[in-house]
Image (spheres, helix red, strand yellow):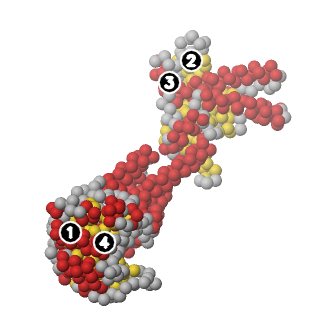
Amino acid sequence: MAFSDKLKNNLLGKVFLSALSILSIRKTTRRNRINAVIGLSLTLLITCLMVLDWSPLENLEDRLLDYCFKIRGPQKPSDQVVIAAIDDKSIDRLGRWPWSREVLARLIERLGRAGAELIILDIILSEEEKNDPLLAKIIGQEGNVILPLVFEFDPDSKTLPTENLNQWAFRSIQKPEGFKRYHPITARKALIPVPALIREAMALGHINMFPDRDGTVRWEALAIEYNGFLFPSIDLITAALFLGVPPQKIALVAAEAVQVGEKRKIPTDPYGRSLIHYYGPEKTFPHYAISAILDGSVPAKALGGKIVLVGATAIGIYDLRVTPFSPAMPGVEKHANVIASILENKFLRKAPLAVNLVLMISVSLLFTFLIIHLKAAGAATLTGGSLLLLLGSGYLLFVRAGLWIHIASPSLNLLFIFITVTANNYAAEERYARRIRSLFSSYVTERVVTELIKHPELARLGGARREVTVLFSDVRGFTSFSEKHAPEEVVAILNEYLEAMTEVIFRWEGTLDKFIGDAILAFWGAPLPQPNHAELGVRCALHMAKRLKELQEKWQAEGKPVLDAGVGINTGEVLVGNIGAAGKKMDYTVIGDHVNLGSRVESLTRKFNAHILITEYTLNKIIPEIERGKIGHLSSKGIQKVIVKGKKFPVGIYDLSSLAPESACQVIECTVDEVAAFDEK
C-alpha cells in the first residue's frame, strides 16, 4: 500500500483520537463538549466526502482554482509559440471550411520558407482527398510537420486502420507497477490521418481534451493507452522535439510524472493528466491570419524559429473550449498554453489527497478547539480570519509554488462549524434564558431576570457565599385571626396583603425567597450583586410599613378585619443558591446563621412592640450612607443587646421608623447595658 493511502487510512482514525482528547478536557463545559462533537462530526463528514470525490465539493474546488487564475491575471507567455489562425477573415478570402489540401500544402510551404521550426496541424485529416499526394509531398519536403490523431472511447465509433501508429507511442515506461493501482485513460479506437500523410509526418500526437464535470478544460492528458501502448499528446511531443529531446528520451513515470529529457519533469495525476498552466484568455498568444500568411503580409521574423500551431479560431468551426479564463477559447490556444508551459518549465501540481486531508483535519480541529471557547463576536472574527488565511494561503501557494491545494473543503467546513456551533450556542442560551426566567421570575423583578439572562454566571446553580441583607415579615396574631374567620375571608385578605408586600419588595429590587404561610422571606445582594443591599432592605421595610398602614385604613373603611405585621432585618454572610433535590424540587434561597438571626429578630417585634427591628450589622452598613446624606428622615433607636436562641454572643437590635420628610436622621445607640437572652424561636 502506498504511503499516501496508509496516511489516508490513519487520518480517519486520528479524527476519533483527537475527538477523545478534546472531549476529555476536564474544564470543558457540557455546551463546549457538544460544540466539540459538532465540529468533529462535520470534519469527519467533509473528510469522507473528500475521500469519495463528492461532485459538489470537487466542483467548488475547481471553481476556486479558476478564480486563482483570474485573480493572478494574464501572464506573458513564451514568444516561441504562435498561431496560424483559421479565422473568419481567412474563410472570407479562401472559401468556406474545410479547405482543399492544396491550400494546406501552400500554407506549410510558406511557413517552411519563413523558417518555422515546427508546424503543428490541429486539423483532423482522416478522409482521403485528391490533393493528398501533394500535401504529403510538402510535409515530407519540410520534415517538421506534426499531425494529430484523435482517440475514440465509444466502441461503436467508425475509424480508419491504425497502421504505423505504434511507433509514436512512449518508448520508456518507468515504475510500471503504478498501473496496477491507477490504470491510464484507455481508448477503444483511433481516428488518424490518411496513411500517406502519416508516412511523411515528423511525429503524431493525440489532441483529445477531457473537460471536467462543469465543462471546463483544466487537465492535459499527456498519455492515453490504446492497443496496449501509451501515446503522448501532440503538445508533449511538440515541446519535446522543439527542445531537442528525441522520443526515446521522453519517459512516462507511471502515476507520477512525465520526464522530458533530464531537465524537465511534468507532474501528473495517477491517470497521466497534467494541470494546464493557462497564461491568459484567448489571443494571449500571437495570432496571424492564414490568409495574411499566404499573401506574404506576415513578416518572416514573426514565424521564423517558432512553433506554429495551425488551428481554427473562427466561431463557425465550433472548436471552442471553456477554460478558467474564458468561456470560449479556441482549442488551438489550449495547445499553445500547454506547449509554452513545458518550454518554460512552468507546471502546476495538485496536492496529493493525503496532504489535503492533513490540512483539512488539522485546520478543522484547531478551529474547533478555539471556537468553542469564544463568544459570538470572537467566533465570527476567528471564522473570518481563518477563511481569509486559508484562501490567501491557497492563492499564494498557487502563484508562488504552482501548488493547488484544496481550500474549499476546509473553508466550507469552518463555515459549517461556525454556523452550527453558533446556532447551538444560541439554542443553549435560549434554553438557559428560559430556565433562568422560569427559575427567577417568581423571585425577582423583570429587570433582574433580564440581567441574569445577560450574565448567567451571576446565577450559578448550587451555592455561593454572599453578604446579603435578609428581611423577615410575619403577620401578628394570624393563628387566632384564622380561627375567628371563614377560610375564604382569610385567604382573600391574606392574598391582598401578600400581593401588596410583594410589589414593595420588587419596587426595591429585592429577591422574594418564599411565603411561609403568612410570613415573607426576602433578601438583597443576590443573585445580582447589590453593594447597597442593606440600604435597599431598610428602605423596603419602611415602605412596607407605610403600605401596610394604607391597607389597614382601607380595611377599616370596608369593615374588614385589620392585619398587622412585624419586620426583622439582618445583614451578614450566608449561603445562597439553588438548594433542594436536583431534578425534583429546587428553591433559590438563603441559609445560614445570619438568616436564622433575621428570623429571631422578627419574632422580637412582638416582645418590644415594634414594627421594624434591625440588627447592629445592618445599621453599621447604612451608617456611612446616612453620614453622606444619601438616606434621610430615618430613626434608628437602640433597644438593647440580646442573645437569641441558638446564639452565644449578644447582638444589638434597633427600632426602625420613618420621620417627617424634612427631618434629619436619628441614630440612637443602646442605653441598656444588660443583655437579654431569649429561648423562644
Give how far apart the Cα atoms at labels 4 and 2 are: 106 Å
* Residue 439 image offset from top left, x and y in percent: 61, 44
Vertical placement of 205 versus 428: above or below?
Answer: below
Mark 4 and mark 1: span between their CA atoms? Answer: 15 Å
Q: Earlier in the sequence, mark 1 or mark 2?
A: 1
Q: Amino acid at mark 1?
A: Leu
Residue closer to the observer: 659 or 237:
237
Q: Which one is earlier in the sequence, the residue at label 4 or at label 3?
A: 4
Chain-order first, disc 3 or disc 1: 1
Pointer 1 residue: 111
Dot 3: few (<14), some (14–19), or many (≥20) neighbours within 10 Å? some
Q: Are marks 3 and 2 in contact (CB under 8 Å)?
A: no
In this rendering, the answer to whether 562 lies above or below 374 is above
Element at label 2: strand
Q: Is residue 514 left or right of residue 241?
A: right
Q: Which residue is mark 2?
A: 634
Q: Is residue 220 left or right of residue 617?
A: left
- Relative placement, left or right, of 101 versus 480 is left
Q: Within 10 Å of the Cα at label 1, are there few (<14), some (14-19), or many (20+) other Cα atoms?
A: many
What amino acid is labelled 3 in the image? Ile
At 56% across and 17% down in the image, what residue appears?
Answer: 634
Residue tagged 4: 122
Residue mark closest to the camera, 4 vs 3: 4
